[in-house]
């Protein structure tokens, strides 16, 4: 049961890094991908229909940790308090920039929202780099360490992954702006999926696991729900397939 | 405020309180939008369907604005539990974690995915699939509220567990999921949300009818939907609230039971202030008073709702509906104060004291995060109120949800004539 829960956690964190990693990366590259405000709206439209369905992977991961590995929640969240706080604030600032950008028709408002999306995406990616770095360094959290700083360059993985996504989803003209960045969505996606596996290898799972009943309830419940979640995600990807041509609601 | 416990408690109260302002409207308005879209879809191209489709877009946009800001406050709240209240997951994570995990995976995950489909798929999805999407969003929002209240209900009345070495272990899943303090609170919150959305719709419609804006037919219908919702929800909300008093903690209610409970707690945990703070009783009083005011307004609604022309006329009636919009909000916040403050000094009643649930972080860190998150939330609430008012005022013509994509760069918007 514990093994099952570890696999599920790897799937959800991997899902988050692969899917949301791309839209965070595009957010980081927003000023370079879109030079004018109307171009930036199109860049945002490239991931707009997905970002809600992407960030839920992280919320579900946090839920899984809370249900199956409460000890890890304590190790990560409490011990890495400053990093998690930055992650959270970056996330909120970025999402607000996205949601509010299209609601007021003024140049300064859109400029402010674009800045919020870019800054929030960078904060989010840097916080993730630091978090993963801390885990890779120590194996089980345990507070800030050298890895928290050494991990910061991992943020560039997000930008790289975002560039691959942009090449695939943006109109040909805008996509050309990242043509010089080597790599494809599938390649950077595979790297993103491996990151949580590497970070989780040394975590002492048995020590942080919940008791048998709670673990079983969480893991079995998740397995039962997984096909429904996958079907919803597939419907989103199928509905919004292809290159983006026009701005969205955001 | 250099007391870390107080700081963390006030921070959580502000987070949870502002989060709930959004939740209340989201739960109710999602239901009403789903019902309106059902009617619009069933009627297809027939008479009245055009107005109904526009109603879905207008009220749907207000719902989406509110949801977008509400979602981030919810994310912060869930993570704040881990940040500031690590003792909670240490001692009770074995029980508390499972409902929260099922909430995120089984409810929130699906809700958010389908909301994206609904918002961005307006002109891409088959209209029945699109209708299905909003119903999935609504039902998973209910599921979400249920699971969160299972966690909260367990904090009020812990059941189905045993303490092993200072850690709570789940022994009875059924007892956890059918805890009356969860089920009854769920009914209470569900109808409270409908009441909020009903007053919100009636208030916004009242504003337009009072100002005699162009959309008389649109807001006459909306006013009726709002008033009917108020009438439907008013009594269930008070019944689900009232039945919960059977499960009230003795230290909240007072009397002989309270003395016995205090004696027992003192014997087991040492002396402390075990009676609920006075603020809890004040919360109860405000909640009941707000309900009485809503009841008075509902009597007016009961007279007015039958005749379309009566809804369009009556300036006093319109003003009353506008000023009534905050009533359910105040009632709900007061109700939460009654429920949560009344549980003190316990985080989990009779199991874990609030002071022992606090994370082992310095008061410096807490102060910084308090300042950062309070400023952030104040901005979020202000932006939400401002945007809701702005788009409510603009009327159905200003709704960009489900509209054809605008040509860029957008032409300057014509200023409204009211």
Image (cartoon, rainbow, N blue to C red):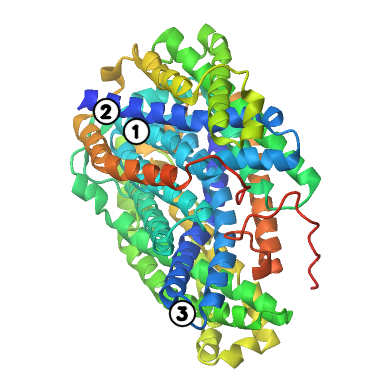
Residue B358 left/right relative to A211: right
Q: Position of residue B291 (x, y in %)?
A: 50, 72
Q: Residue at x 66, y 89 (%)?
A: B313
Vertical placement of residue B204 versus A168, above or below: below
Q: Give how far apart the Cα atoms at labels 3 and 2 are.
A: 47 Å
Q: Give how far apart the Cα atoms at labels 3 and 1 are.
A: 40 Å
Q: Residues within 10 Å of mark 1 (few under 14, many from 20)?
A: many
Residue B109 shows which numbered tag?
none
Occupied quadrant, residue B418: bottom right
Q: Are marks 1 and 2 in contact (CB under 8 Å)?
A: yes
Occupied quadrant, residue A160: top right
Q: Residues within 10 Å of mark 2 (few under 14, many from 20)?
A: many
Q: Chain of mark 3?
A: B
Q: Residue at x 47, y 62 (%)?
A: B30
Q: Position of residue A155 (x, y in %)?
A: 57, 19
Q: Secondary structure at mark 2?
A: helix
Residue A38 left/right relative to B346: right
- Dots 3 and 2 on the same chain: no
Q: Nearer the viewer, residue B171 or A99?
A: A99
- Dots 3 and 1 on the same chain: no
Q: Identify the residue under disc 1.
A: A64
Q: Identify the residue under disc 3.
A: B231
Q: Nearer the viewer, residue A91 or B203?
A: A91
For the question of whether residue A39 can be seen, the reply is yes
Q: Chain of mark 2?
A: A
Q: Are marks 3 and 1 in contact (CB under 8 Å)?
A: no
Q: Identify the residue under disc 2.
A: A5
Q: Are marks 3 and 2 in contact (CB under 8 Å)?
A: no
Q: Secondary structure at mark 3?
A: helix
For the question of whether residue A145 can be seen, the reply is no
Q: Position of residue B342 (x, y in %)?
A: 44, 52
């Amino acid at each position: 049961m514990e093994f099952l829960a570890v696999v599920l956690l790897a799937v959800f964190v991997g899902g988050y890094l692969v899917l949301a990693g791309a839209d965070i990366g595009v957010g980081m590259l927003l000023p370079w991908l879109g030079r004018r405000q109307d171009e930036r709206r199109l860049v945002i439209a490239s991931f707009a229909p997905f970002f809600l369905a992407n960030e839920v992977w992280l919320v579900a991961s946090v839920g899984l940790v809370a249900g199956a590995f409460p000890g890890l929640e304590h190790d990560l969240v409490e011990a890495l308090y400053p990093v998690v706080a930055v992650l959270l604030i970056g996330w909120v600032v970025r999402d607000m920039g996205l949601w509010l950008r299209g609601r007021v028709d003024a140049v300064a408002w859109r400029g402010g929202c674009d800045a919020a999306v870019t800054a929030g995406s960078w904060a989010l990616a840097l916080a993730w780099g630091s978090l993963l770095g801390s885990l890779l360094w120590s194996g089980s959290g345990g507070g800030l360490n050298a890895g928290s700083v050494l991990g910061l360059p991992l943020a560039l993985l997000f930008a790289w992954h975002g560039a691959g996504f942009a090449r695939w989803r943006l109109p040909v003209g805008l996509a050309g702006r990242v043509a010089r960045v080597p790599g494809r969505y599938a390649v950077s996606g595979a790297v993103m999926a491996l990151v949580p596996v590497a970070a989780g290898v040394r975590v002492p799972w048995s020590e942080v696991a919940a008791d048998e009943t709670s673990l079983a309830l969480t893991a079995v419940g998740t397995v039962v729900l997984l096909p429904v979640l996958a079907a919803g995600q597939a419907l989103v990807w199928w509905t919004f397939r292809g290159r983006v041509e026009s701005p969205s609601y955001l | 405020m250099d007391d870390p416990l107080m700081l963390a408690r006030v921070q959580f109260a502000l987070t949870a309180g502002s989060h709930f302002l959004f939740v209340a409207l989201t739960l109710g308005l999602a239901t009403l939008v789903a019902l309106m879209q059902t009617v619009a879809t069933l009627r297809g191209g027939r008479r009245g369907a055009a107005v109904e489709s526009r109603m879905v877009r207008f009220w749907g946009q207000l719902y989406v604005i509110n949801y977008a800001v509400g979602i981030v406050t919810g994310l912060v709240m869930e993570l704040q539990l881990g940040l500031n209240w690590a003792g909670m997951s240490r001692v009770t994570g074995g029980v508390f974690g499972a409902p929260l995990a099922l909430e995120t995976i089984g409810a929130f995950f699906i809700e958010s995915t389908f909301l994206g489909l609904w918002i961005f798929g307006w002109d891409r999805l088959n209209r029945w699939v699109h209708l299905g999407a909003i119903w999935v969003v609504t039902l998973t929002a209910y599921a979400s509220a249920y699971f969160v209240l299972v966690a909260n209900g367990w904090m009020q009345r812990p059941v189905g567990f045993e303490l092993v070495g200072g850690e709570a272990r789940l022994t009875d899943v059924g007892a956890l999921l059918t805890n009356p303090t969860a089920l009854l609170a769920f009914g209470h919150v569900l109808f409270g949300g409908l009441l909020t959305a009903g007053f919100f719709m009636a208030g916004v419609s009242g504003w337009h009818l009072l100002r005699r804006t162009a959309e008389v037919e649109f807001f006459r219908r909306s006013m009726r939907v709002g008033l009917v919702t108020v009438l439907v929800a008013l009594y269930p909300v008070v019944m689900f609230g009232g039945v919960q008093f059977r499960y009230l903690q003795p230290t909240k209610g007072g009397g002989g039971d309270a003395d016995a409970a205090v004696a027992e707690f003192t014997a087991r945990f040492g002396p402390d202030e075990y009676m609920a703070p006075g603020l809890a009783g004040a919360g109860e009083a405000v909640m009941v008073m707000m309900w009485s005011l809503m009841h008075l307004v509902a009597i007016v609604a009961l007279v007015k709702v039958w005749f379309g022309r009566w809804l369009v006329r009556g300036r006093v009636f319109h003003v009353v509906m506008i000023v009534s919009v905050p009533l359910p909000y105040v009632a709900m916040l007061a109700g939460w104060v009654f429920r949560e403050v009344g549980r003190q000094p316990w985080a989990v009643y009779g199991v874990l004291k609030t002071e022992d649930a606090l994370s082992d972080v310095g008061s410096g860190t807490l102060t910084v995060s308090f300042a950062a998150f309070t400023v952030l939330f104040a901005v979020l609430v202000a932006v939400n109120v401002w945007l809701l008012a702005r788009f409510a005022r603009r009327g159905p013509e200003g709704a960009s949800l489900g509209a054809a994509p605008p040509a860029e760069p957008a032409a300057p918007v014509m200023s409204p004539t009211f």
